[in-house]
């Protein structure tokens, strides 16, 4: 595993697109991020019943669409009839749940870098997730910008690494575990992603000293963001990326 790898990510990353101003994980959220000059975003990948990968944070349609039920109960053709915009506001009425391929095409057109979060989904094994997503990324990520894959499910990342020795990977933590350094080394990870509420200065220093990029989610307060920059954080993932001051 190539430990010399680094990632050139922007300091400010839009969470689920620009989710304060548009419905999260939609093409509209990516376009709105672009309008606000955001050039890196994070989105969540989940799987439908027929194996289609879509942008969606949850296991179900309930929170972010006009439909109820598990993602696994629908197929790609059902996406045409689902409105994932109206729950946010009338302005986005009819906005669909995008497939990951559609998102890749748009991100490439807009020259936006991507932190793709692979969701551990109820009823889907890590093997299935990697078996579906690895070939899709190989065949469809055509952008010049980097693609960084993260997940709270480190088994997904481990399996991904077995498939692809080159892919940029970054484990997600809520609370950083004591064995974080071993995990980073075993994964050949470039970045460690953690909740801003659980980052301490000694940890930030240790992670940076070990040579890793430090990504923090989800910070929506400009004053806290400033403190995080002072702690040496590389990138902040935010619902309000347009309101944060640069590093
Ligand atoms: O990748 C950072 C962040 O998105 C992780 O949490 O629940 O917002 O996907 P969540
Ligand atoms: Mg996420």
Image (cartoon, helix red, strand yellow):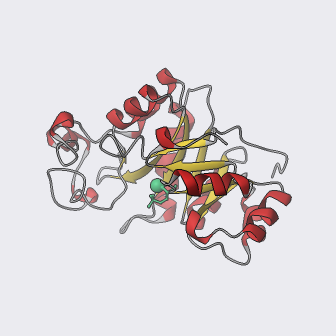
Position of 131 compared to 66: left or right?
right
Q: Quadrant of the C terminus?
A: top right
- The answer to whether residue 95 shows anywhere in this view is yes
Residue 10 at x, y percent in the picture: 63, 38
Residue 131 at x, y percent in the picture: 50, 52
- Residue extending farthest to the bottom is 178
**Closest to the observer, 167 or 130:** 167
Q: What residue appears at the point 44 percent right and 45 percent down from the top-left corner?
A: 240
- 146 relative to 218, above or below: above
- 164 relative to 119, above or below: above
Position of 64 compared to 13: left or right?
left
Residue 129 at x, y percent in the picture: 47, 56
- Residue extending farthest to the top is 109
Position of 152 compared to 188: left or right?
left
Position of 212 compared to 20: left or right?
right
- 70 relative to 40, above or below: below
Q: Hey, which quadrant is residue 202 in on the image?
A: bottom right
Q: What residue appears at the point 42 percent right and 26 percent down from the top-left corner?
A: 35
Residue 182 at x, y percent in the picture: 78, 70
Q: Hey, which quadrant is residue 5 in on the image?
A: top right
Q: What residue appears at the point 14 percent right and 50 percent down from the top-left corner?
A: 66
Q: What residue appears at the point 53 percent right and 30 percent down from the top-left corner?
A: 112
- The answer to whether residue 94 shows anywhere in this view is no
- Residue extending farthest to the front is 223
Q: How many marks?
A: 0
């Amino acid at each position: 595993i190539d430990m010399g790898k680094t990632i050139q990510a922007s300091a400010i990353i839009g969470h689920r697109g620009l989710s304060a101003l548009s419905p999260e994980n939609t093409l509209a959220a990516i376009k709105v991020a672009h309008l606000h000059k955001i050039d890196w975003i994070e989105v969540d990948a989940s799987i439908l019943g027929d194996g289609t990968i879509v942008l969606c944070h949850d296991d179900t349609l309930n929170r972010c669409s006009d439909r109820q039920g598990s993602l696994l109960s629908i197929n790609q053709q059902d996406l045409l009839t689902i409105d994932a915009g109206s729950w946010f506001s009338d302005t986005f009425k009819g906005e669909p749940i995008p497939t990951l391929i559609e998102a890749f095409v748009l991100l490439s057109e807009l020259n936006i870098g991507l932190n793709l979060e692979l969701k551990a989904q109820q009823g889907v094994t890590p093997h299935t997730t990697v078996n579906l997503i690895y070939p899709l990324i190989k065949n469809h990520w055509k952008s010049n910008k980097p693609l960084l894959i993260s997940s709270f499910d480190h088994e997904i990342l481990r399996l991904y690494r077995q498939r692809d020795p080159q892919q940029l990977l970054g484990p997600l933590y809520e609370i950083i575990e004591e064995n974080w350094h071993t995990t980073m080394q075993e994964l050949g990870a470039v970045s460690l992603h953690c909740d801003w509420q659980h980052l301490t200065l000694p940890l930030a220093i240790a992670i940076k000293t070990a040579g890793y990029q430090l990504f923090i989610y989800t910070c929506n307060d400009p004053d806290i963001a400033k403190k995080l920059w002072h702690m040496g954080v590389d990138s902040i993932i935010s619902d309000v990326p347009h309101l944060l001051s640069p590093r």
